[in-house]
Amino acid sequence: MQKIILSLGFCLFTAFSFAQSAYTGQKFGEVKPGDVKPAAKMEAAMGDKKIADMKIEGKVVDVCKKKGCWMTLEMPNGDPMRVTFKDYAFFMPMDIVGKKVVLDGLAKKQTISVETLRHYAEDAKKSPEEVAKITDPKKELAFEAKGVVILDK
């Protein structure tokens, strides 16, 4: 009986160890092991849902210039997708543009208000003239990450 318990414990420890090493790199928040989709396939994976819990992988194209409070990922249509962080629990380093990341959290289809779009533009250090040109809300895909891994690749 003791050998069975010891063997079972070893198997669980081994499985847990392999699961935790699924994504290697700098970690922020919590990223659980599981199926990771390319960011380009996120909308298709969501189907008709407005919000879906998932893991995605993508390339960073911009990071908030104030303190790393958001980032954007490259998308196939040319419009970058905004990523925010659940409850502002963590921030991204500002030097990760061009790096690949794995995100765990909520994929969203949403409409962004003019006020919020202007706030994002100010965070991105856009000129007052560029900020003033924002006059319409925007429908977009977004992601609220509860965890991020900046991959070592």
Image (cartoon, grey):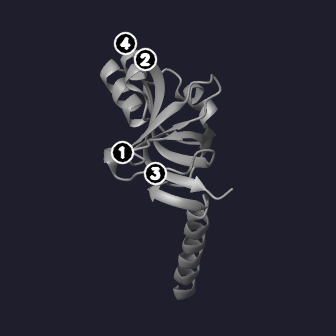
Between 144 and 32, the residue placed more toward the observer is 144
Q: What element carries label 3?
A: loop
Q: Is mark 4 on a helix, strand or loop?
A: loop
Q: Pointer 1: what residue?
A: 86
Q: The C terminus appears in which quarter of the rendering?
A: bottom right
The location of residue 34, given as percent across then percent down, is 57, 50
Badge 1: residue crowd in 10 Å (few <14, some 14–19, many ≥20): some
Q: Earlier in the sequence, mark 1 or mark 4?
A: 1
* Up/down of 140 relative to 34, above or below: above
Depth check, mark 2 against mark 4: the one in front is 4
Q: Pointer 2: what residue?
A: 138
Q: Write down the quadrant of residue 97 in the picture.
A: top right
x 38%, y 53%: residue: 90
x 37%, y 12%: residue: 135
- Name the amino acid type tagged 1: Lys
The location of residue 84, given as percent across then percent down, is 41, 40
Q: Distance between the residues labelled 1 and 4?
A: 27 Å
Between 96 and 49, the residue placed more toward the observer is 96
Drawn side of residue 119 relative to residue 16, left or right: left
The location of residue 128, given as percent across then percent down, is 37, 24
Q: Which mark is residue 135?
A: 4
Q: Earlier in the sequence, mark 1 or mark 3?
A: 1
Q: Pointer 3: what residue?
A: 92
